[in-house]
Amino acid sequence: MRIRYDMKKLPNGQWCVYDIFTGIVAKHNGAQVIGLNISETDKMVNLLNKRDAEKCPNLKPKVTYH
């Protein structure tokens, strides 16, 4: 799956999901994805990456053989 979102722990101890291309905190349903526990943040990363991959099916990594 294409990876666009990841998670990181902020200096204040909160977790957030961010866009790895822009560095900006991701939004879900109009709200920033910040302040969740580590498990919730991980689930949100998976959800947002899945949605992004569904919106952009032509950007899936191609299988290569060496």
Image (cartoon, grey):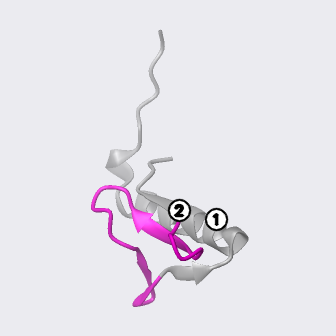
Callout 2 touching callout 1 (CB < 8 Å): yes
Dot placed on the residue nearer the N-terminal end, 2 or 1: 2
Is residue 54 part of the magenta span, yes or no? no
Outermost residue on the front side: it is: 11
> Which residue shows up at 58% across the image and 62% down it?
46
Q: Residue at x 30, y 56 (%)?
A: 21
Q: State whether residue 27 is above or below residue 65.
A: below
Circle 2 SS class: strand
Q: In which quarter of the image is residue 19?
A: bottom left
Give the side of residue 57 with respect to residue 63, left or right: left
Considering only vertical position in the picture, is 64 above or below 14? above
Image quadrant in which you'd find residue 15: bottom right
Residue under label 2:
7
Q: Is mark 1 on a helix, strand or loop?
A: helix
Q: What residue type is labelled 2?
A: Met
Q: Which residue is drawn at 47% across and 9% down?
A: 66
